[in-house]
Image (cartoon, coloured by chain):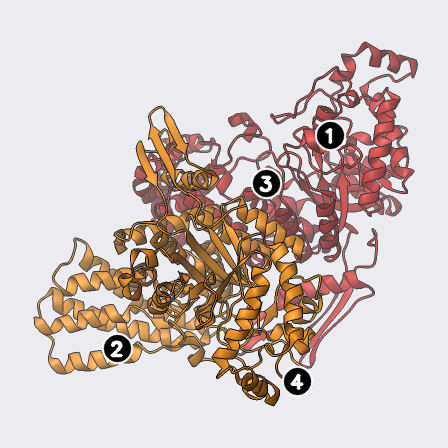
Chain colours: A orange, B red
């Protein structure tokens, strides 16, 4: 069995005579082999590895990826593919979010109505789970299951309504969000149920850590119940947070009884929380620092939400030991175990999810493995490019899948013009998507926003070129490169429009394609002005910038990410 | 349970009011649903299907695909993906070739050394097989297992050497070909073993048909054994064929004992073969006709060997009821049950195999389903294009896999120039590959020949355009199209060469890339001459044609398939 904090170091020595990998235990061997694989290159004479010596060990002992199988069920293939990806980037904790309002995803033999009524038939059998546990262990990965409670638990109540605080009946939730139903913390029967359930699940999952969720319980169902209000009064529980702390304390004892250590989200940290509980922070480093200062061990997830379509650079910049945590004493710092990338799946089907997780999760993995001082962003992006190729050979072909989806979207026609548009757009970041359009469990995720990667590489590169041009630091080829891109984007609309209107799936892209052309035209004018040192009058520039401002707005739930680069070029025409 | 010859017809009526699918039984419903799916189109208003009425039924009751899991083991995913593909093209028999000299691929509980010593650990458990049987049945597909005997059985002898005619010991065969070892038909212990083994396997596979192979037993191990020679004399068995007939007769009784019908390759047809044996013909329609005339039922596979890199048009042109079979009486014709595409896997790993099977197997499927008169090749190729897209959405993304392999081959660099070369080359047809290079079980199949489809669509289109130009029937755009292609091919070499020499995997392509450029240059000269009606002197033409003849030869186990089109253009310069 694998434990938190084992020595994962390895020593790799590559000479003309051969490669020697040594490590104090198998985890180091696994990591060293991945490093070795990264070093293999094709040469005219065959495969080769440069001579070198590497001494390597991780900075943090907890380097995780959470996948939410609750909101959209993720088939075993997807789980295995991600375990392969984690192995490649030396992550060592797979945090499996197994229950949600929208689905209870694992077979319980003790309480079979959990999966029978709460999963739409989409759940993992215990045999399948054991298969995943073996698969993970073979890759040096611990599996920490999460059963979210007392909130986010609607799917439990479909089969077992007595667990809930309200009177039911309950249905599997079909919308996204935070909902009122919560387990009833006042009834002994709740704990009797959980005792048996946790007995079953702690026996199935061998890891020493066990996650009980605890996030986003809004307490409304409690507030609505006179019986529960009465209980709170009797037990001197002054508010819902106190009631949840009471609940967490009781559940934590049931977990401890099985010699497991409880993990929970920020909310489980209350005045009386037992000190062996591990806090997973979705709130940020300050919240994590607060826990560490009080003697709790913690894991950072704020800043590592890979479902939120932030850039790899953004995730890479988040360090578990900056901001609030930077001021901790060495002993307190040791309480920071590491971090976890989290993939929530409101907007991710099995087809989409890998392209949301990868390659950006590799930036998180590197942050958690490598020294704090390793933070050059350009170099990180180069490694992500290489990794994307490698992961596709290892059976994680998210780039190909995205291309396939695009071909499907283009309706079997030549997808090149749609690819040009796709290459410069991005899904909106953070929680903007839910404001732009209404989605639920049944929404088909088959539009361009679901097809494109969270981060446009082309736009990133264009924006870099534009910044260099605007600041007079153009590299050789920058001008030509910018012009080629802008011409391509200006002219693409004419080719693309006829095919966009042929399908209900693409007709929403008409304005975006049109505006891309207009933005590129403006960009070309600015480029000409800059190249010829011809000033642009203030009025024109103002009009251009105000039009570009419009193009920054989402269209078809997508952002045109080259607009910032064009704005930079236009702004630069001022200083001629 | 599904039976041979069930009514698979369906009636589909699509009107403004809705779509109505009726069928006498579930098989027709499955087929009708696939037709319906083919009809769905994207429109500006959403998905739509044109109004129509279809009455449809298959021409032959046995429409199969054979996959050889023996030479290269094929994981369950590959099997399931192909069952999905078969469902899409309405095939109804999956013929599973489960044992070979190179591997015994299924768990036997009675004789566990079969898989333990004969499979390198690569075999299907009986539980997994049952999973596949269910999966196939849900798609209207029968599963006919094949255990090849008495030849092609070396892997059996590793664990059970007494089954063989020689003295052993035996090892799993690592080369490709026809080998001497064969089961010993003279010992009663052989039949006792097979009796138990067939008892186990006929119980596992529910289908009424059971395939015992029987192909390519060269008899050499028999000839080398005085004991076996003696047996033949005693039993008046005049030659090896007679001895094999004796063996087949004994085995057939063991199969019949379990109420199963025996299927075997051509060789099992001997003077005394029982009349319920079904003959699968790899030899051709004449052999099949001979069987049908003698009252045996038969299945055609000659002409449907999709591993041999023939064109879809070639397979499509092969009809079970032409040539020898055309002269049969109606009663004899009824003995022709249909056909099977066969995928032998000397040159196919799990990564490669789907791109070898698809989309060309769809041409075989159509031949076996549709009327004999449906045979327009251009129209068939259009359907294959559409099908390739659809199959990729159904989880058979062989096109993407091929692109991925090409990216890997290009060593992470921009693969566009390599794609250009890849788009015009093909693996050699039939059995030419084994003459060009030495391969065995361990040969990594990671070169360009393993990456490209068996048939170059680009070359096919170019050759069509060239033929139209040469015969004065150029369609609008043909001249321009031909010129663009030739320019691309002429100039590609300069871009590609530097990256080819960087890797041992691609350095072998240097001459091919160079010759493509030269052939294209010659093509452009011919095109100019034809367009300007400038005659080319006979001497030049002769020199050009002799150079092109050289370019027809395989390089790096690949054929340049645009050469025929260039030759056609050059030849046409004569008649100016």
**Residue found 75% across the figure and 30% down from its top:** B215
Is residue B44 visible in the rendered image? The answer is no
Disc 3 + disc 1, Cβ < 8 Å: no
Which element type, helix, strand or loop, lies under badge 1? helix
Q: Is residue A418 above or below residue A5?
A: below
Q: CA distance from mark 4 to mark 3?
A: 68 Å
Mark 1 lies on residue: B113
Image disc number at residue A410:
none
Mark 3 lies on residue: B310
Image disc number at residue A548:
2
**Residue found 16% across the figure and 53% down from its top:** A476
> Which numbered mark, 4 or 3, is in the foreground of this view?
4
Q: Quadrant of residue A334?
A: bottom left
Image disc number at residue A167:
4
In the drawing, does residue B493 fall left or right of residue A414? Answer: left
Which subunit holds the residue at mark 2?
A
**Residue found 76% across the figure and 56% down from its top:** B58
Which subunit holds the residue at mark 1?
B
Marks 1 and 4 on same chain: no
Q: CA distance from mark 1 to mark 4?
A: 60 Å
Q: CA distance from mark 2 to mark 1?
A: 72 Å
Q: Quadrant of residue A275?
A: bottom left
Judging depth in this view, the residue of B380 and B576 nearest the camera is B380
Which element type, helix, strand or loop, lies under badge 2? helix
> Where does residue A106 sit, x and y in percent of width and height?
63, 62
């Amino acid at each position: 069995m694998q434990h938190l904090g084992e020595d994962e170091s390895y020593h790799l020595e590559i000479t003309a005579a051969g490669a020697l990998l040594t490590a104090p235990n198998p985890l180091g061997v696994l990591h060293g082999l991945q490093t070795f694989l990264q070093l293999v290159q094709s040469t005219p004479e065959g495969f080769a590895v440069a001579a070198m010596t590497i001494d390597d060990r991780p900075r943090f002992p907890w380097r995780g990826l959470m996948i939410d199988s609750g909101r959209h069920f993720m088939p075993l293939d997807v789980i295995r593919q991600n375990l392969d990806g984690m192995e490649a980037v030396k992550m060592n904790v797979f945090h499996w979010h197994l229950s949600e309002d929208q689905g209870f995803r694992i077979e319980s033999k003790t309480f079979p109505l959990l999966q029978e009524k709460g999963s739409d038939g989409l759940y993992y059998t215990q045999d399948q789970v054991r298969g995943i546990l073996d698969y993970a262990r073979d890759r040096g990965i611990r599996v920490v299951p999460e059963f979210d409670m007392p909130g986010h638990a609607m799917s439990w109540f479909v089969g077992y309504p007595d667990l809930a605080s309200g009177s039911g009946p309950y249905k599997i939730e079909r919308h996204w969000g935070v909902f009122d139903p919560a387990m009833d913390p006042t009834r002994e029967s709740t704990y009797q149920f959980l005792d048996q359930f946790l007995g079953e699940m702690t026996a199935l999952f061998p890891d020493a850590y066990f996650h009980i969720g605890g996030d986003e319980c809004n307490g409304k169902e409690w507030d609505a119940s006179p019986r529960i209000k009465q209980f709170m009064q009797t037990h001197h529980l002054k508010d819902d947070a106190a009631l949840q702390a009471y609940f967490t304390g009781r559940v934590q004892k049931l977990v401890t009884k099985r010699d497991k250590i409880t993990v929970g989200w920020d909310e489980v940290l209350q005045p009386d929380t037992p000190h062996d509980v591990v806090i997973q922070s979705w709130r940020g480093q300050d919240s994590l620092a607060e826990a560490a200062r009080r003697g709790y061990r913690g894991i950072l997830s704020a800043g590592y939400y890979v479902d939120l379509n932030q850039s790899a650079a953004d995730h890479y910049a988040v360090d578990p030991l900056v901001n609030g945590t930077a001021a901790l004493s060495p002993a307190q710092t040791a309480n920071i175990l590491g971090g976890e990338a989290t993939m929530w799946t409101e907007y991710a089907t099995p087809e989409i999810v890998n392209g949301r997780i990868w390659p950006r999760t590799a930036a998180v993995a590197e942050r958690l493995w490598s020294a704090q001082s390793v933070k050059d962003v350009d170099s990180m992006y180069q490694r992500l490019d290489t990794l994307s190729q490698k992961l596709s050979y290892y059976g994680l072909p998210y780039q190909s899948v995205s291309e396939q989806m695009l071909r499907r979207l283009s309706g079997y026609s030549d997808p090149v013009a749609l690819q040009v548009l796709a290459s410069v757009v991005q899904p909106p970041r953070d929680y903007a998507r839910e404001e732009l359009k209404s989605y639920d469990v049944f929404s088909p995720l088959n539009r361009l926003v679901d097809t494109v990667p969270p981060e446009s590489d082309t736009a990133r590169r264009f924006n870099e070129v534009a910044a260099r041009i605007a600041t007079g630091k153009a590299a050789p080829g920058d001008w030509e490169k910018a012009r080629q891109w802008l011409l391509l984007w200006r002219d693409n609309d004419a080719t693309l429009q006829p095919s966009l209107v042929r399908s209900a799936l693409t007709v929403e892209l008409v304005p975006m394609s049109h505006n891309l052309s207009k933005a590129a035209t403006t960009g070309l004018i600015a480029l000409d002005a800059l190249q010829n040192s011809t000033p642009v009058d203030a009025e024109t520039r103002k009009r251009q910038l105000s039009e570009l401002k419009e193009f920054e707005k989402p269209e078809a739930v997508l952002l045109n990410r080259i607009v910032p680069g064009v704005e930079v070029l236009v702004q630069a025409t001022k200083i001629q």
